[in-house]
Image: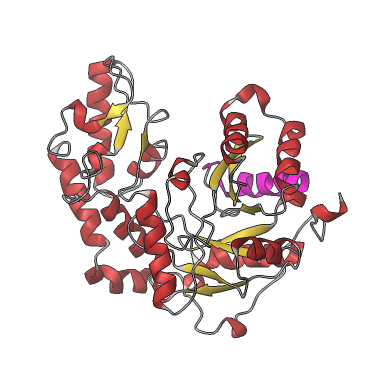
Amino acid sequence: MLDFVPVYADKLPIIAHFWQKEKKKYFAREGKYPNFDTGYWSPPLTGQMVYDIEKRQIEDIGLEPFVSVTDHDCIEANLGLSEPNSEKTVPISLEWTVPFEYGFFHVGVHNLPKDRAVELSTTLIDYTFDKSRHSNEELTELFAMLNELPQVLVILNHPIWDIEMVGKERHELLLKNFIREHGRWIHAFEVNGFRSWSENKAVIELAEALGIPVATGGDRHGCKPNTVINLTNSASFEEFVDEIRTDKHSEIALMPEYERPLHSRQLQSFSEILSHYPHFREGRKRWFDRVFFDIDNGKGIVPLSTHGWERGGPAWLRIAIWTLGFLGSPAMRPVFRLARKKDDRVPVDGASTKFESPDLGDLPARLSSETI
């Protein structure tokens, strides 16, 4: 979705100045501010390209890869993935947006049974977008349904990230309420390759305190593979799921790329998302072909390129995109290293890292759906 755009546009130096000017011009012309709640964007790579890049990274370090690709509230890309090895199952997975109280959470639902994947994903997605159905009782039924499928892995993605932008304290309260109500259905918490080390460390500490494992995820929307992976001796994805769910065992590895300052990697990803790819198929070459917006001109939600953005929008925006690309370039990495907080420096040796026990308040000391 594009609802994050106004929030970040107000914060970025220089861009904020031009953003405010454009907002005023739009209001003077239309009598209202632009609505970003209905717009959305698509990353440059197809699902198959993402799958192949992730697979190649693991093969290049001499390991046998299993890759689970997720889209937000959609399995369409998964259904089209191909794997040359006919003996290997490609998991059908999605990142499910779960509305809860005044916010929402992202839940990774991995390895849906192929014969029921469309039916199950439709059921989950319908709940997300039908506000009349939002209740703890129905959400419990959906989680219980997933838990009854032994090959399905349910992961609470980036649990500490205030992704709904309600503020740190309100998000922490929301997370505790969610864990209290539905934590027993969660098989693992996510260590995310696109979140800071201090945040991932806090996730590990919370998972340890609650007695559940951690699993890796990427939130990668650009062109680089994930910077964290799971390690396992399992011979299939189903065995890996059982290792997490039954044995509650997980081993993760931070790839060398994860050590790079997060803000530098984020800016590089933004640059990749907003880059031009002349060798891609039509509709995916330019970023303004992949951003969809409704400007109330009767055309509905259509690519920006159909709104007269053939050159990529106003000059100030093209300059801002170039600036993002420069800030995300290797030349700027030393600056981000100097600016990085001490808590976000990735430890050289995990064994020497000091982990602490978080205050759980009235949360249960252990979570388990096996006792239900």
Residue 200 vs residue 277, the one in the foreground: 277
Total marks in image: 0
The image quadrant where one finds the N terminus is top left
What stretch of residues is rendered in magenta?
164-182
Q: Does the magenta portion include 319?
A: no
87 in relation to 362, above or below = below
Residue 219 screen position, x and y as percent: 46, 55
Give the image quarter of residue 83. bottom left
Q: What residue is rendered at 39% in x and 37% in y?
A: 2
Residue 51 vs residue 301, the one in the foreground: 51
Q: Does the magenta portion include 177?
A: yes
Asked whether, in this view, residue 115 is left or right of residue 208, the answer is left
Asked whether, in this view, residue 273 is left or right of residue 214, the answer is left
Q: Is residue 47 visible?
A: yes
Dominant secondary structure, magenta: helix
Residue 302 screen position, x and y as percent: 29, 27
